Amino acid sequence: MASRATEEISTTTTETTSEASIASIDEHDDENDTKERVLHRYFVQEWKLLKSLLDRIVSNGRVTDPSAVNKIRSVFDKYQEQGQLLEPYLETIISPLMLVVRSKTVELGSASDELVDIIKPLCIIIYSLVTVCGYKAVIKFFPHQVSDLELAVSLLEKCHYTTTATTLRQESTGEMEAKCVVLLWLSILVLVPFDISSVDTSVTNVSCFNGLEPSPLVLKIMEFSKDYLSNAGPMRSIAGLLLSKLLTRPDMPKAFISFIEWTHEVISSAADDFMDRFRLLGVVEALAAIFKAGARKSLLDVVPLSWVDTSTLMKSSITSRNPLLRKFLMKLTQRIGLTCLPCHSPTWRYVGRTSLLRENISMTSIDKDKQCINGLDANALIEHKGPDILQEEVMEVPEIIEEIIELLLSGLRDTDTVVRWSAAKGIGRITSRLTSSLSDEVLSSVLELFLQGEGDGSWHGGCLALAELARRGLLLPASLPKVVPVIVKALHYDVRRGPHSVGSHVRDAAAYVCWAFARAYNFSDMKNILERLAPHLLSVACYDREVNCRRAASAAFQENVGRQGTFPHGIDIVNTADYFSLSSRVNSYLNVAVHIAQYKQYLYPFAEELLYNKIGHWEKSLRELAAEALSALVKYDPGYFTDFVLEKVIPGTLSSDLCMRHGATIAAGELVLALHTCDFTPSADKQKSLAGVVPAIERARLYRGKGGEIMRAAVSRFISCISVTHLPLPEKIKRSLLDTLLENLRHPNAQIQACAPLIGILSPILYLANKSDEGFNSITLKYLKLLEDPNVAARRGSALAIGALPLEFLLTKWKFVLLKLCGACSVEDNPDERDAEARVNAVRGLVSVCETLTKSVTGSIFSFVDEDVALYQMLKDEVMHTLLKALDDYSVDNRGDVGSWVREAALRGLERCTYILCEKESVGFPRQMSEAKSEMEPFPSAMVETNQRLPLFDVSLATNLVGSLTKQAVEKMDKIRIHAAKVLQKILYNGNIFVPCIPHREKLEGIIPCDVDSEWAVPTFSYPRFVQLLQFSCYSRYVLSGLVISVGGLQDSLKKASIMALLQYLEVTGNGEDEKRRSRENLLGTDLLWILQEYKRCDRVIIPTLKTIEVLFSKKFFLNVESLTPDLCTGVLDSLVTELKSSKDFTKLYSGISILGYIASISNQLHARAFSKLLFFLGHRYPKIRKAGADQVYLVLLQNGDIIAEGKLDQALEILSETCWEGEIGEAKQKRSQLYQMAGLEEQTLLKAVDGKPKTNGEQRTCVSDENESYSALVGSSGF
């Protein structure tokens, strides 16, 4: 037997090899080729890899490389959703592997422990195909010889009693896969057309079983299968499948009865424990499989017992908590019902079309007319075939059927979708075997699920049931008038539940019903129905909140267009409302729906859908989108929207429902604006009603309580819309609306503030304010006054409002406005009044005002040249200076670096103001100055003359601009770095406006290429480029002041990239290496000293600067430059005296101590001074600082022995190593005094001046008192 199996394997291998070689030939005609060869050519591109791995496994008779299994599984997993692509390869893959399993079982015997280790990896591969392609496609290629039955049972027994000791494994060891594969193998082997007792070699006398008693082999299979029915894995389902194939054999009556009795005992004694839950699942699933596969005659005898068990279990508490068990019970219930009813196809069933394309094509027109007639008058057909129908009407239906249908109907109300879906299928299958009158009763019961008091589960289950009835031809056209209204309601089903709603699954199922209608009925039967369904389907496809519902409705409409063909403009609509265009809700509302609404039969349903269902939706963003979508439809029929829609919307602004009044207010404004766009003027009554909307809302006090904030935003939008349309308003209402906008500006909600100025002021002010200079000035001064309001919300809103003011409001007070906004951009002196959002809005408002003042079509906005010159000179001197100063806003609060918001806004503003100045610089001012005088206060003539001679964008301004941008481009925040680099890139390469006077422009363009975009986010790309600017003295201080923040920062990746870039810059290679390195070190050292002086006592910069100096000292920089070292070390020492004095920051102290240690190690005149300062920290109040100072002193003494006399050096080292510096401070100070004496130094403090002379007591007291004069200074010193 083993040799025969080996021959089979070799033969199969040869065949598969030849097939693969044939398939590899590329010269084939795809149209004439077989499906398998085309798939070989174009699909499963990994076939060569798979084939080589499988051939190696088959030739070796086992898996020698465990990684090969993972490779094969990874290939199979790619086809999880398209398993049919693997089907042509299944025989080539499965047959050799199963033959290896079979041959090894024969060769080694089931008692061998090696056998299980061999077949496990093989079964992993086979079971992977089962999960991808399904077991039905796979078991066809299993060996199914009669002799294999005992072999498979023995192999299952071996796998059953073999367990792996390892637990909590991440990957499968193959135990589960091996059991599943052997069970599947047995499910096909038990179908052998012989008495199994004749195959069982353990039976000595076959005649004693007489074909009724189960043989030992059968009992063994049943024993294992019953055990697996309690398993939580896939073996449970496969064991049920095996039992259904085994027990439904004609020679298994006693085994079948015994199993049914066993299931009755299990169900009757079921308890709510862990094991019984899985056993119940397995038992019910096995019974459902048996009732599906068994013959009706043999099953009828066990129906009463099985039904009693099913109905009892369905009512138990165990089932109520287990949806999977309820699903299997629904399957079992419907199959019991199908067993009780005779199997026949009812003659009253609707047959609408031929399912085969070949028959449809060959059908003549006369046949089609007959088919249409048959489908159209199905009831008449029943009357024509009277005798047959009457015979069905008198058919006896078992009483149990009524209970079964009742249970299935209750399943349609279940809370879980899988249970409802199974119940719906059961309703359809059982109804297909009932008479026409009984089917009508079932339909009536299904329609009762849509009554008023039913929940969303009932509606969903009812839709699924109607779809099943329609698909099976059990829903006659005569019943459609009762069904269609229900489906229309289901398409719009949406029930509010607290802050959300339910109903998306109902709408999806209703679309499925419409899809089933298209496939089930002839167009002649559906013509009138589709005229009612089409608008509702398209309404859901365009306006539903959920994307799956939009796509489902679109698919149903597309199916109806393709199969029914009676929709006007159907092809155009299908091309517009496709799967991808409906994926975006905004695109669906504003583009797809607007395109479809051009056809009149869809315009009015769309408007009603938005009016009644969407502008009052519970989701705020959808209400706003619906209002915008409603206004987009106005252009097709302005009269309808004025007379009908607006009439419905205006009363809704005072609705008791917050969602409705919010949506109605926005919709009213959008409709008025759309009517104005269409040049359509509402009637006088409508205008009066619109004018009273806002006063009515305020009289009703709808700004208070819940929803007051969103109503304020809606009112601001409404005011903006009616202002653009120039709606006639009384003066009293105009003033009221202005007060409303002003009040909204003071609101703390940022969304309301943004809505008020940006939308509600730009257009409305021109319309609402008095058309006079006094009116303009009063409004402008009112907003300017709010810039100094203690209320931060008022400052935020007023800054935005000033930025949105039209030109007329700024002409007479432009200088005052600019100065006020420049002041508002600075950090407030009072810490309690500081607000980052207010400064951000001030920066944005300042830039917007500058653009408004300088933007003119015909030239200058001013009548006189001196005003024009003064404006641009102020823009250069004040505005640019303010924006550059805003780049130094590093304010921090509990939200983090809020100053970054100001810096980001300033970066945008600098770019825009630079373009304004450079554009004006290229155009120039008029040569002749007007002799007329301005209404505003004139500038001194000397200033004007001077300003005329000075350029607007000079080298100094360009240097400050580029330097500030490069500083931000090398700091630690990714967003700011990227933005600064892009702004600098735009300034250098702007194609419309050339920015002049930039020093070293060619070098900058080489460092900052124009074709780089996303790479600026990568530190390893950006830092090496910007560090090159350190060689230019005009930019070096800017770059270095930003670079030290990254070098001394906390983020490791940024720190490594910045340090690496700096070190690579300093380590010069090539000709003139020493001289160039020396010059770079000199410039870098000078700049570091400048930073220490410029940012004195500013820990945000000083601490990372000290860390940077420490890193450079550790890399031996500055220590070999004789001319630089004394000056640098002196400057650093002087700075350390100031910075470390009374400091409580450990990071700062550690860095300072380390730097003192490096300086003290240098053999020059400064080492004694540095060593003296270092010894001071041995008596510091913090033990860890004393310990760090002792470590540094020890290292200094080892490196520079000249500090202490040679005879005292060992004693000093002994004191340093044996003293517990983290102990008592008194002992530490005593030891420190001894070290001072050994070094011959005077014991001193950090309070000494630079020249070493002690300060007077008065001076000391002054310094000490200024150190922490307030709590804020203490907090600031801690880094907060």
Image (cartoon, helix red, strand yellow):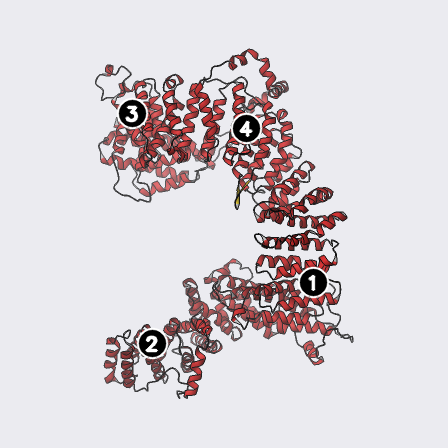
Which label sits on residue 806? 1
Mark 3 and mark 1: span between their CA atoms?
92 Å
Counting other residues with Cα less than 10 Å from the Cα at mark 2, is it few (<14), some (14-19), or many (20 or more)? some
* Mark 1 and mark 4 residues within 8 Å of each other at the beta carbon: no
Instruction: Write down the residue under mark 3.
Output: 149
Counting other residues with Cα less than 10 Å from the Cα at mark 4, is it few (<14), some (14-19), or many (20 or more)? some
SS label for mark 2: loop
Which label sits on residue 1181? 2
SS label for mark 4: helix
Residue 293 point in image, percent of width and height = 39, 23
Q: In this view, does 351 lie above or below 843?
A: above
Please report whichever mark, 3 or 4, sits nearer to the chain's N-terminal start: 3
Please report whichever mark, 1 or 4, sits nearer to the chain's N-terminal start: 4
Q: Disc 3 residue type?
A: Leu
Q: Disc 2 residue type?
A: Arg
| In this view, the mark in front (1 or 2) | 2
Mark 1 and mark 4: span between their CA atoms?
62 Å
Instruction: Write down the residue under mark 4.
Output: 447
- Tell me which corner region of the image, top left, top right, bottom left or bottom right, holds residue 36: top left
Please report whichever mark, 1 or 2, sits nearer to the chain's N-terminal start: 1
Residue 729 point in image, percent of width and height = 74, 55
Q: In this view, does 471 lie above or below 24?
A: above
Mark 2 and mark 4: span between their CA atoms?
86 Å
Mark 2 and mark 3: span between their CA atoms?
87 Å
Please report whichever mark, 2 or 3, sits nearer to the chain's N-terminal start: 3
In the rendered view of the protein, which quadrant contains the N terminus?
A: top left
* Mark 2 and mark 4 residues within 8 Å of each other at the beta carbon: no
Q: Is residue 1248 above or below residue 189?
A: below
Which label sits on residue 1129? none
Q: Nearer the viewer, residue 249 or 796?
A: 796
Please report whichever mark, 2 or 4, sits nearer to the chain's N-terminal start: 4
